[in-house]
Amino acid sequence: MNEELQFIIDSSIESMNSAIEHLENELLKIRAGKANPVMLSSVMVDYYGSPTPLAQVANVNTPDARTLSIQPWEKAMLTEIEKAIMNSNLGFNPMNNGESIIINVPPLTEERRRELAKMAKAEAEIAKVSIRNARKDANNEIKKTEVSEDEQKNCEIDIQKHTDVFIKKTDEIYLRKEKDILTV
């Protein structure tokens, strides 16, 4: 196969892979009733005037399936971390015991589980759109190349096969997450 066409296929596969990686990262942030330090990855703490990710000012652990424990590296940061968690709209109620911050992750209601499943579905759809956009971009690039029509068609067929594989993978990831969310 033409080197230029192979490069187009490889770059489209790379784009599709990054869509899958993004989907997996976004789904990690959707909680499924179990405590996970990733839940707090979006929390930004005011660290001496500059917004800093929580993971850079404290250690976040899960002592059990329903509890998050946050141990700041500086005791002075306790109230700032507590304030940042309250302002993050994650629905957590942090408890400050003077040493660390403890968050009890409440069990999910059926209604909330369905909302989270919808959020996961929306993320999966965004990933599918990204995959299809990568296909469209690759097909446009193929049309610009100066190779025979047969080679162009074969290349488009290859890209469609890769697209189908990545769409299927997206569906599998979503179904796994949905099962995880809806399981009580």
Image (cartoon, rainbow, N blue to C red):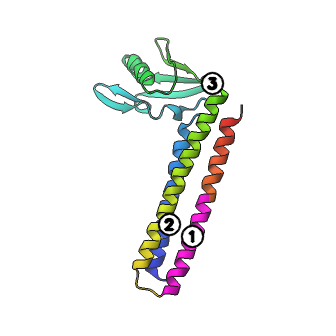
- The mark found on residue 66 in the picture is 3
What's the residue type where badge 2 is placed?
Answer: Arg
In percent of the image, x 53 and y 37: which residue is there?
Answer: 29
Provide the residue designation for mark 2: 135
Element on which disc 3 rests: loop
Q: Which label sits in the foreground, 1 or 3?
A: 1
Provide the residue designation for mark 1: 160
Comparing 74 with 146, the one in front is: 146
- Relative height, residue 26 to residue 71 (above, below): below
Asked if residue 24 can be seen in this view, the reply is no
* Residue 137, x across and y down, in percent: 44, 67
What's the residue type where badge 1 is placed?
Answer: Gln
Crowd around label 2: few <14 · some 14–19 · many ≥20 (10 Å): many
* Residue 28, x across and y down, in percent: 55, 40
What is the spatial separation of the Cα atoms under label 3 and label 2, in whole angstroms?
A: 42 Å
Element on which disc 2 rests: helix
* Residue 100, x across and y down, in percent: 48, 17
In percent of the image, x 53 and y 19: which residue is there?
Answer: 102
Crowd around label 3: few <14 · some 14–19 · many ≥20 (10 Å): some
Asked if residue 38 can be seen in this view, the reply is yes
What is the spatial separation of the Cα atoms under label 1 and label 2, in whole angstroms?
A: 7 Å
Mark earlier in primary sequence (3, 2): 3
Q: Quadrant of residue 87?
A: top left
Mark earlier in primary sequence (1, 3): 3
- Relative height, residue 91 to residue 56 (above, below): above
Q: Quadrant of residue 105?
A: top right
Q: Is residue 144 left or right of residue 100?
A: left
Q: Are marks 1 and 2 in contact (CB under 8 Å)?
A: yes
